Image: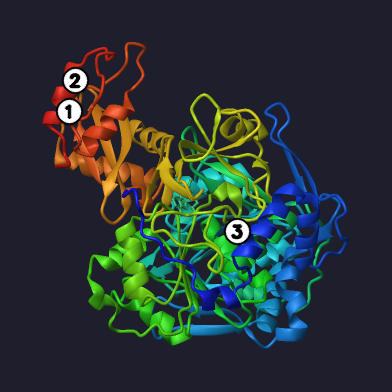
Amino acid sequence: MSEQPQVHPVRDEFAANAWADKAQYEAMYQRSIEDPQAFWAEQAERLEWIKTPTRIKNTSFDRDNVDIRWFEDGELNVAANCLDRHLAHRGGETAIIWEGDDPADSRHITYAELYERTNQVANALKEMGVGKGDTVTLYMPMVPEAAMAMLACARIGAVHSVIFGGFSPDAIAQRVVGAQSRVIITADESVRGGKHVPLKDNVDAALTRDGTDVCEHVMVVKRTGGDIDWHDHRDTWFHTMVDKQALECPAETMNAEDPLFILYTSGSTGAPKGLKHTTGGYLTYASMTHQYVFDYKPGEVFWCTADVGWITGHSYIVYGPLANGGTTLMFEGVPTYPSHGRIGEIVDKHQVNILYTAPTAIRALMAHGDETMHSSHRDSLRLLGTVGEPINPEAWEWFYRVVGKERCPIVDTWWQTENGGIMIAPLPGAIDLKPGSATKPFFGVRPAVMDSDGNVLEGQAEGNLVILDSWPGQARSIWGDHERFVNTYFSTYDGVYFTGDGCRRDTDGDYWITGRVDDVLNVSGHRMGTAEIESALVAHDAVAEAAVVGYPHDIKGQGIYIYVTLTDDYEASDELKKELIQQVRKDIGPIASPDVIQWAPSLPKTRSGKIMRRILRKIAANECDGLGDISTLADPSVVDELIEHRANR
Ligand code: PRX
């Protein structure tokens, strides 16, 4: 990273029309930190409350008592905020533009239609006996029914747990058991890039696993009409169940701190954890960040290319845009199908104003050259955004120059599943852009840089990124395991939230996220734990020991590199490599497919038996000259052998 990054200053004409210019950002930020109670009491007014909250912030990061409550005496309903209150003014306007995998398929769904359909789904859930506090698992394609199902849960006070469609039956089973879901909503198949993915078959397979008999109903959206098995005692078609329902369904009165959803994400140890997000604070934060970070104006078309199975899809396909009465585009397919120009073509077709995507998608397009963008004009675009991983300046500049034609600011947004909404990003009318830097904190967010001894570093600094105080969108706990929540986020350093990311703060006070400092990988913006992949591998008889590390990958950001020590009964072979890849895909899903497998007669360990991952990361990155001190290894000769047979050169 160069010492003098290129700066793209805020343009005057953009600032003049933005929700916040520099002075407004600074004044509002100051107030949000000095008087969070008053600041967030005002911001809560952006929602419609059944009972207006009077207790605004009641939060403790103290490791002996981590307790996070926002608006705790307020009452509201999220679906009513996303639908009902818009009916009078914009019932006939488009809430969701759906673009199918096939470019010939698209649909506009108005607020009035979304309202009625959501109510019907809510009534169907009620008929299945789902009520306030019950959990519902969603394993769905990117179809409007996914948003309807989420909102329907919110309407009746049920808690949704959305599972990304790229996860395997084992991963589904784990989450269904974890959330104790009696109902799953899925589809026969999803369609991505012309290929069909057997969602219902995966659910069927999941429901043969231990503990999943908690699930009584599977409601199936007919997406393709493909062949599926049918189990009369638990399967129902979505359309048969939903079409017959009444168009009205009262919205349940929810406390601000009632759970809205569970979302599983990977950590550095153990199985994925279900983060618990609640109602009032989450929606206030999703709505406010959507408005300010994207400078969203009524009538604009907003397109977030994420999947609803991730937090980005929750907050910026569904809840943020709909709370703001916006038009949100939902795309079923992949950016490269049927051609690499698809993203631009969708922008033109639906006159998209704001495009929010991931660095990995940008790099994939960039690899095909500027011509990929020649099939579209993209003149409707006003703002671009990125999320999910650090963006390298080359990809940033390409996005800026080629996709946005040097007209559109880019907001590089740093945040996490745990955060609920964007935490660090340049408000486009307020903050100068630096390619590669997420720049400044959002209102109410107090980032700090800490050294490994827990000292807060001032000024220009490099270290671990922590957040000093709570913000309304924060996850409140891990579902069913508050102790794990405390241990994961509040025990590394007492009294602060530890993000797991490293960062650098420059002399302007801008933050540069450098990536995870723990054993979490970020592969194409998908987060996964090395421990999870290792445990999938050691479940195979051939594997005595496995170590998983990330290595730099041109398109994916990080690739998955695996060192495997075989048991005596097995011999290394290409066949076995395939089996091991299959094993990981089965346990976790295709998104965790290993890129490189190296056979390792043994792994570098300290004398106390700890694997030295630092060394394994260097070898995987093909940086074998700077291995540092290896004298503490039990057997330093292991390293030479691994270097000699390294698989990435
Ligand atoms: O390492 C950071 C990276 O993604 C992690 C969070 O992943 P997840 O919970 O799946 O949420 C992704 C989308 C909100 C972070 O700990 N990350 C996310 N955004 C950025 C980023 N790293 C650098 N720059 C970003 N803009």
Q: Secondary structure at mark 3?
A: loop
Write the residue at 55% across / 50% down: 417
Crowding at dot 3, Cα within 10 Å, few <14 / some 14-19 / many 20+, comes out as: few
Name of the residue lying farthest toward the bottom: 92
Residue 642's mark?
1
* Disc number lying in front (2 or 3): 2
Front residue of 184 and 549: 549
Residue type marked 3? Arg
Residue type marked 2? Val
Counting residues from the start of the chain, the first of labels 2 and 3 encountered is 3
Residue 320's mark?
none
Residue type marked 1? Leu
Write the residue at 67% across / 88% down: 92
Q: How is the image coloured?
A: rainbow
Evaluate if marks 2 and 1 touch, with contact meaning CB atoms under 8 Å apart.
yes
Is residue 185 visible from the viewing direction of this image? no
Crowding at dot 2, Cα within 10 Å, few <14 / some 14-19 / many 20+, comes out as: some
Residue 234's mark?
3
**Left or right, residue 490 beside residue 265:** right
**Image location (x, y in percent) of residue 78:** 73, 64
**Image location (x, y in percent) of residue 168:** 43, 50
Classify 357 as above or below 263.
below
**Image location (x, y in percent) of residue 348:** 41, 85
Classify 529 as above or below 151.
above
Write the residue at 49% across / 50% down: 508
Residue 638's mark?
2
Crowding at dot 1, Cα within 10 Å, few <14 / some 14-19 / many 20+, comes out as: many
Q: Secondary structure at mark 2?
A: helix
Is residue 380 visible from the viewing direction of this image? yes
